[in-house]
Image: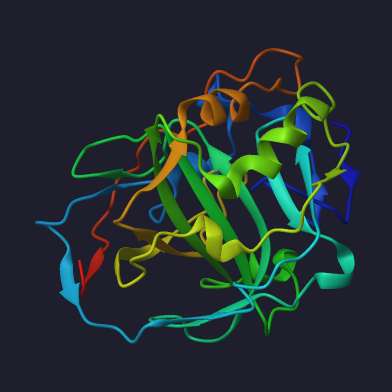
Amino acid sequence: MNCLIVNIVVFVNVFSGILCADEWDYLNFEAWPETCKTGHRQSPIDLNQKKAEAQTPDPFKFYSYNKRFKANIQNSGHGVVITFSPENKGVVTLAGSVLPETYIFDNLHFHWPSEHTINGKYYPLEAHFVHYARSAGSVAEGLKRPNGIAVLGVLLELSLDTNPAYESIVRALPNITENIRHPVQLDKPIALAAFLPENKKSYFYYEGSLTTPACNEAALWTVFTQRVKIGQKQYNTLKHIYNIKKQLLIMNNRPLQQLYGRTVKYSSCCQ
């Protein structure tokens, strides 16, 4: 088994640590590590409003989410990943709501179709905003803690109109379609707030895991109920990339996991 020690961020399964990138794919889930198959805190799950426990947590605090920063995009071999340039690393943070501390933004990536469902319904696309606990200092350390990672999930619906926030991403995609792990700088700085729904007070939250190997049970999940629109052509371009085996990546979503007695909570404010 040949593994590489890396210090770059590529998709969910790689967060500065030991990378065995070619040893898993979305065609054989039975080959994933044992925790993925036997863990009792796994993600994704179905988010059922009738079964969720209603709560009224404090609002999220988004720091520097409205600021534009230079960003890089790459094909990880498992999906499309966006990270900020090194000089801006650690600037964008998230706090408030049910989070026990401040979390630092690490990467934005996408799954098609969605991984989470709401009341049993899948959506064409799901965006994940991955953060690690400031006290952990890195994603690698955050993965060692029960709540060392915080992920915001945004579900997307298709539209005939383009979404301006995705235009710089779409323009860069032809450069990474088959070029795996070769970052390309976006032609315009981006602000993460542009990718979030307007209503950020209505969401589900629960304790879960990464949705890719090693399926670390370290994530605090928030999935917003309001969907964001993406143009049909933008969507088609975004998901037209090749995997580590040089095959078209038709889908990159993990099947739904069992709850095993976990409580899903729901912030019903301001729908």
Q: Which quadrant would residue 142 be assigned to in this image?
A: bottom right
Residue 260 or residue 220, whichever sits in front = 220
Image quadrant containing the C terminus: bottom left
**Number of marks in picture:** 0
Q: Position of residue 66 (x, y in %)?
A: 60, 72
Residue 185 or residue 261, whichever sits in front = 185
Left or right placement of residue 16 versus residue 108 in this view: right
Image quadrant containing the N terminus: top right
Left or right placement of residue 254 versus residue 32 in this view: left
Q: Position of residue 109 (x, y in %)?
A: 61, 46
Left or right placement of residue 41 versus residue 34 in this view: left
**Location of residue 31 with respect to 229 vertically, above or below:** above
The residue under the point 67% across, 75% down is: 92
Report if residue 96 is visible in the image.
yes
The residue under the point 54% across, 86% down is: 101
**Location of residue 141 with respect to 243 vertically, above or below:** below
Residue 133 or residue 167, whichever sits in front = 167
**Location of residue 229 with respect to 143 vertically, above or below:** above
